[in-house]
Amino acid sequence: MKIMKMMIVVMIFLLYSGCAKEPEYELIRKVNYDCGFDTMCQLNAYVQSEEEFNAYYESMNEMFSYYNDLFDIYNNYDGLNNIKTVNDMAGIEPVKVDGALIELIELAEEIHDISDGAFDITDGATLKIWHEYRDAGKIKNQNGAYGSIPSTEELDAVKEYKGFEYIEIDKEASTVYITDPNVSLDVGGIAKGFATEKIAKALEEAGLEYGAVNAGGNQRIIGTQPDGSGYNVGITDPRGSGNIAVIPDQKEVSVVTSGDYQNYYFADDGQRYSHIIDPETSFPATYYTSVTVVVPDSGIADCLSTAFFVLDYEEGLELIEKVNEAYDLDIIVVWISEEPLDDTSILSPMTDTQEYITCSENFRDSLVTE
């Protein structure tokens, strides 16, 4: 399954040290490159035995594989009604689905409404066009040539085929129905984060106290370190190597970054075209090189990182207020841009690239940039 959203955030785990405690914990890390979502999945856990770790790790892999299939928009699977099944049955009949799929759609609609449409999973018709051009463009780039971009006429022709008014959910029957055959769902901006949150909660319920699930840079921290301290989370430099900043001492939160530096191609106008499409313009957003969001829930973080990426800075500040009020939060947002966004924007000495870091007001004194 190809999810149109690649996000890179590097977790720096500090080894636990200090006075001996009972029980003693060992930090074990293991990565699976075949868990789905077109990415890697990693479990970092402080455990008392390798046997305990393996049980959590195997469970994580099984759940990622299942959610990959459930939220797949490209492939059908025997015995499973997934997002592609729902899209295939658009305008034909309701589809009975796993309750988790309904939960995902409902969360996506919440963020759609809060962000005034900046996040929209119903815009599948537009995203399909860009997916095809991007895949073709990547192949051309690999062969030393430029790709092309869709025409305005081509994009305008499908612009009306979106909106949650076309999505009917019957929770009692556990069905989803798209009433217009031209409308389709693309859950690339939420699926990985939603699955990560579900999996982290399941591991917590199974007994994991300290650690983190990392789905291709989508980090969900479970608890703290055994000594009660938090973790330092590095924000990847979108135009260089290493970290451009560090978010320190994070506990029981999710950290998600959306950026233009992984899933993109260069077109014949010489411009970089990323996978993050602005629903208003139907073209890739270009305000920033990356946006990082820190909130407790990984599904919400995933949606919001996309919404902030497609909104200009002033609109982003307004969205922070809306989200904090709606979810009773104090979210952290870090924008990386090629030009300063306001007089608080700084150049990071952690990298040689000329990029500016702008942090939400609640975290300006805490972000580590050197």
Image (cartoon, rainbow, N blue to C red):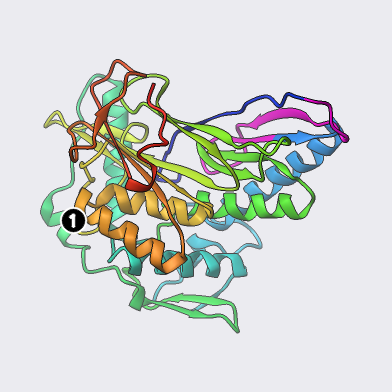
Nearer to the camera, 90 or 239: 239
Residue bounds of the magenta highlight: 19-44
Q: Quadrant of residue 205?
A: bottom right
For image coordinates 44% across by 56% down, the residue present is 187
For image coordinates 80% across by 31% down, the residue present is 25
- Please indicate whether residue 107 sits to the left or right of residue 310 in the image: right
For image coordinates 23% across by 37% down, the residue present is 344
SS state under label 1: helix
Q: Position of residue 285 (x, y in %)?
A: 23, 46
Q: Position of residue 303 (x, y in %)?
A: 41, 55
Nearer to the camera, 99 or 74: 99
For image coordinates 32% across by 29% down, the residue present is 139
Residue 355, can we see it?
Answer: yes
Q: Quadrant of residue 111?
A: bottom left
| Relative to 348, residue 341 above or below | below
- Please indicate whether residue 304 sits to the left or right of residue 217 in the image: left
| Relative to 130, residue 95 above or below | below
| Relative to 101, residue 45 above or below | above
Magenta segment includes 29: yes
- Please indicate whether residue 339 sits to the left or right of residue 83 in the image: left
- Please indicate whether residue 21 sits to the left or right of residue 8 in the image: right
Q: Position of residue 279 (x, y in %)?
A: 25, 58
Which residue in the protein does label 1 denote? 155
In what quadrant of the picture does the C terminus appear?
Answer: top left
Q: Position of residue 24 (x, y in %)?
A: 84, 31
| Tag 1: amino acid | Leu
Nearer to the camera, 356 or 361: 361
Magenta segment includes 236: no
Residue 128, can we see it?
Answer: no
